[in-house]
Image (cartoon, rainbow, N blue to C red):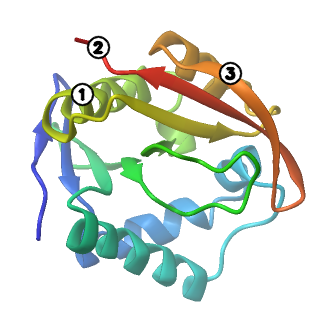
């Protein structure tokens, strides 16, 4: 199963593919990118490969997953945004589709994460018909918390994920 290609003013969002591996690897090996999301260093090639396989499996099994975001002009890999079911080990449990996003450091602050997230949320509201979505964000990731708020997410719980404090946020579908 492959998913839909979404387009915005500046982006083409395609379901993640094996051909995205080199770009995904470069993103997750960037210590500035990884450090803002997780309390750890860059990922190994093996970890990124498993991450890519997980993303491919989402599309095959669930009919949704991560989209690779690329610039329309030139095709540069910007990052990813997706509708996920990671079955995270946290309390309270995540009980709705999870939205996640990440934009490479070189593309941050340009509104591209918002543009991609808006496209995926519109798809989620209409095609997936999810009444509610959630996201899990580290309290230290101020840019993602601000973006989540701008697109309608509101905190509903504090949790711990992989030993780190995290915030669960929810957004209800737009009619």
Name the residue at the bottom extreme: 46
Label 2 to label 1: alpha-carbon separation: 6 Å
Q: Relative to residue 84, is residue 131 depicted above or below?
A: above
Mark positioned earlier in the residue sequence (2 or 1): 1
Q: Position of residue 86 (x, y in %)?
A: 52, 62
Counting other residues with Cα less than 10 Å from the Cα at mark 3, is it few (<14), some (14-19), or many (20 or more)?
some
How many numbered marks does the figure carry? 3
Residue drawn at point x = 82 percent, y = 33 percent: 140
Residue drawn at point x = 16 percent, y = 22 percent: 9
Q: Is residue 90 left or right of residue 8?
A: right
Q: Are marks 2 and 1 in contact (CB under 8 Å)?
A: yes
Front residue of this view, candidates 55 and 84: 84
The reply to whether residue 6 is visible in this rendering is yes
Counting other residues with Cα less than 10 Å from the Cα at mark 1, is it few (<14), some (14-19), or many (20 or more)?
some
Label 3 sits on residue: 155
Q: Which mark, residue 174?
A: 2
Mark positioned earlier in the residue sequence (2 or 3): 3
Residue drawn at point x = 68 percent, y = 21 percent: 155
Q: Is residue 90 left or right of residue 73?
A: right
Label 1 to label 3: alpha-carbon separation: 19 Å
Q: Is residue 119 left or right of residue 54?
A: left
Mark positioned earlier in the residue sequence (1 or 3): 1
Label 1 sits on residue: 125
Image quarter where the C terminus lies is top left
Element class at badge 1? helix
For residue 39, what is the image quadrant? Answer: bottom right
Q: Are marks 1 and 3 in contact (CB under 8 Å)?
A: no
């Amino acid at each position: 199963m492959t998913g839909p290609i979404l387009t915005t003013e500046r982006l083409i969002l395609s379901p993640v593919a094996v051909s995205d591996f080199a770009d995904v690897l470069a993103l997750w090996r960037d210590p500035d990118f990884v450090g803002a999301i997780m309390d750890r260093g860059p990922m190994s090639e093996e970890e990124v490969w498993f991450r890519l396989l997980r993303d491919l499996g989402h599309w095959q099994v669930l009919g949704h997953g991560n989209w690779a975001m690329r610039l329309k002009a030139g095709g540069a890999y910007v990052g990813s945004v997706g509708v996920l079911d990671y079955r995270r080990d946290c309390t309270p449990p995540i009980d709705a589709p999870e939205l996640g996003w990440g934009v490479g450091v070189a593309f941050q602050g340009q509104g591209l994460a918002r543009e991609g997230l808006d496209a995926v949320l519109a798809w989620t509201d209409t095609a997936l018909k999810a009444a509610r979505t959630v996201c899990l964000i580290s309290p230290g990731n101020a840019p993602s918390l601000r973006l989540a708020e701008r697109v309608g997410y509101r905190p509903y719980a504090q949790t711990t994920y992989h030993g780190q404090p995290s915030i669960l946020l929810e957004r209800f579908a737009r009619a």
